[in-house]
Image: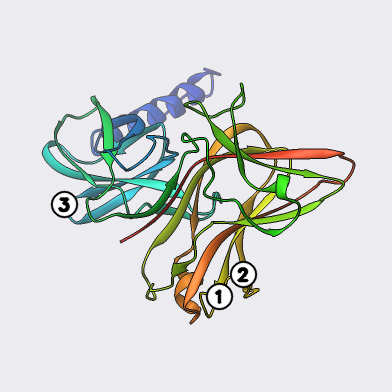
């Protein structure tokens, strides 16, 4: 029995119980091993365009077991030890929205063999590439000082996506830009070519691009029933981006929109509007890729 004559006896006894309990629990709790991944780079082949990417997450598997999705950079605790066969997939934010993460279907999964030790951290340097089955319908990097997006739906001829060369280019010698002004406050431009709409439900189709801009921009698809260049077509908006002072990468999912329409032809369109209070504004583009299987 603890004597009440010692005023600190009760406190000492409680502390002793607490530390004893913690010590007992620690002996039974497993200690994790760790993986550290700082980034996930992209490597491209000839005719696949820029290495620009925005891989924001990794999707981790142990054989076929899904271990979780982790934002980069990531230090991942694992209750795995010894030699393990891991599969890592690159994740993106679909349509630039944080709430819609996706493992990008056109990037190769990375398989790694690691030997994990309790409380030790293994660092992985990851690099992926496009799957060989990826089909690039077009790649526009503006490096030929021409523009694949000069079809004017609405606006003035000078409002088309035109190549330019100055300190604002993303990479290389040229990027492209749309100019809006009070004389043409709303501008819609599209790809020069119409494409046959042969996509099926569930088939992934993505539009990649780098952008920055002084005005918001909406990406969409204009559908046609014929090859007649006079046909007005029907525009279906999909998603967009806000103003950004810095270059960013974005991935737009066009698959469901293309598959649900029964129109025979389509073109990709950009729509931008002059923000209130501005006299003019520019929206910049680079490395525009349309990819499917």
C-alpha gap between disc 1 and disc 3: 52 Å
Residue 16 percent across, percent down from the top left: 39, 25
- Residue 166: quarter of image: top right
Q: Is residue 217 above or below residue 243?
A: below
- Residue 204: quarter of image: bottom left
Q: Which residue is mark 2?
A: 236
Q: Is residue 154 above or below residue 166?
A: below
Q: Which residue is mark 3?
A: 63
The reply, left or right, for residue 281 in relation to residue 122 is right
- Residue in view at x 87 percent, y 46 percent: 182
Q: Is residue 86 above or below residue 94?
A: above
Within-10-Å neighbours for mark 3: few <14, some 14–19, many 20+: few
Secondary element type, mark 1: loop
- Residue in view at x 48 percent, y 21 percent: 9
What is the number of the mark on residue 228? Answer: 1
Q: Quadrant of the N terminus?
A: top left
Residue 190 percent across, percent down from the top left: 59, 57
Q: Earlier in the sequence, mark 2 or mark 3?
A: 3
Q: In terms of depth relative to the viewer, which is nearer, 229 or 149?
A: 229
Secondary element type, mark 2: strand
- Residue in view at x 43 percent, y 73 percent: 197
Q: Is residue 255 visible?
A: yes
C-alpha gap between disc 2 and disc 1: 19 Å
Secondary element type, mark 3: loop
Q: Quadrant of the C terminus?
A: bottom left
């Amino acid at each position: 029995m603890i004597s009440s004559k010692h005023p600190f006896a009760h406190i000492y006894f409680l502390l002793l119980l607490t530390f004893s309990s913690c010590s007992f629990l620690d002996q039974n709790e497993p200690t994790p091993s760790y993986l550290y991944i700082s980034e996930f780079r992209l490597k491209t082949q000839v005719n696949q365009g820029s290495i620009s990417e925005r891989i924001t997450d990794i999707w981790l598997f142990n054989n076929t077991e899904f271990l979780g999705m982790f934002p980069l950079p990531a230090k991942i605790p694992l209750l795995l030890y010894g030699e393990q066969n891991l599969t890592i997939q690159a994740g993106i934010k679909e349509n630039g929205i944080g709430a819609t993460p996706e493992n990008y279907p056109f990037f190769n999964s990375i398989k790694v063999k690691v030997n994990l030790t309790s409380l030790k951290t293994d660092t992985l340097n990851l690099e992926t590439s496009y799957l060989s089955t990826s089909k690039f319908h077009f790649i526009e990097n503006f490096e030929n000082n021409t523009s694949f997006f000069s079809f004017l739906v609405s606006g003035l001829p000078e409002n088309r996506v035109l190549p330019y060369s100055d300190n604002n280019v993303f990479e290389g010698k040229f990027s492209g830009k749309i100019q809006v002004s009070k004389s043409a406050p709303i501008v819609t431009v599209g790809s020069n070519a119409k494409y046959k709409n042969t996509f099926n439900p569930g088939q992934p189709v993505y539009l990649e691009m780098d952008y920055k801009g002084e005005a918001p921009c909406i990406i969409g698809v204009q559908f046609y029933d014929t090859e007649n260049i006079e046909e007005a077509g029907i525009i279906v908006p999909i998603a967009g981006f806000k103003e950004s002072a810095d270059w960013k990468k974005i991935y737009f999912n066009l698959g469901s929109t293309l598959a649900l329409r029964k129109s025979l032809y389509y073109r990709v369109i950009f729509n931008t509007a002059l923000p209130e209070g501005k006299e003019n504004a520019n929206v910049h583009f680079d490395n525009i890729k349309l990819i499917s299987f």
